[in-house]
Amino acid sequence: MNFTRLFEMQKALDAHIEHSRGLKSENLLERKILAFHVEAGELANETRCFKFWSSKAPSSRSVILEEYVDGIHFLLSIGIELGFDDEAAYAFPEPAEEKGEDLVKRFITVTEALEEVRRHKSKNAYKQLFESCTALGSALGFSGNDVEQAYLEKNEVNYERQRKGY
Ligand SMILES: O=c1ccn([C@H]2C[C@H](O)[C@@H](COP(=O)(O)O)O2)c(=O)[nH]1
């Protein structure tokens, strides 16, 4: 799992989007934080982990992984905005599948950490956010390799969407 490579790819994608949308001099941090909250909600919805009132099965593993890496795009993008993308030590824990209430706690931890980043914009808050996101990924049963591969694929889709005027 090579987060340095993903940070580089995210930087290039963000620059491409900002250039083509004429947003070079705008501060996009708050919009990216809200986008990340939305992605976390979409991911939670696909896992159905909080839906105690429903017995419908979760979405497929590939759908959940794609939603997860949408969130990873914004995690990296926020790190770049704040200048915290130089951290070589970000790692991905071993997959350790969890269900139900345990996953609910993981999601709440991510959204709380995201709010801490919004309030304090500190490196420590960002590290906490990063750790809560990788812990969530491993609780969903994903390995670092799964996430890296899915990120590379979605990054390409994001370029394609821009080319097609998404
Ligand atoms: O500055 C940006 C804006 C968007 N995205 C990517 C992240 C997600 O993969 C995808 C979200 O797009 P929607 O499907 O939610 O529109 O766009 C970026 O990487 N950087």
Image (cartoon, rainbow, N blue to C red):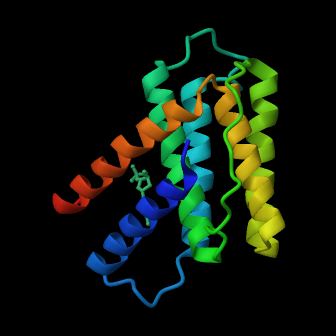
Residue plotted at (55% across, 17% down): 58
In the displayed structure, 97 sits above or below 126; it is above
Q: Quadrant of residue 33?
A: bottom right
The quadrant the C terminus occupies is: bottom left
Looking at this view, name the residue that lies furthest to the left. 164
Observer-nearest of 86 and 154: 86
Instruction: Name the spot of residue 32 as percent of width and height, x first.
Output: 55, 66
In the displayed structure, 50 sits above or below 29; it is above
Visible in this render: residue 165? no
Instruction: Name the spot of residue 37 as percent of width and height, x first.
Output: 63, 53
Observer-nearest of 99 and 156: 156
* Ligand 1 visible in quadrant: bottom left
Instruction: Specify whether 15 is left or right of 141.
Output: left
In the displayed structure, 119 sits above or below 104; it is below
Observer-nearest of 24 and 156: 156
Exactly how many numbered labels are in the figure?
0
Visible in this render: residue 146? yes
Residue plotted at (61% across, 44% down): 40
Instruction: Name the spot of residue 13 as percent of width and height, x first.
Output: 37, 64
Residue plotted at (73% across, 58% down): 114
Looking at this view, name the residue that lies furthest to the bottom. 25
The quadrant the N terminus occupies is: top right
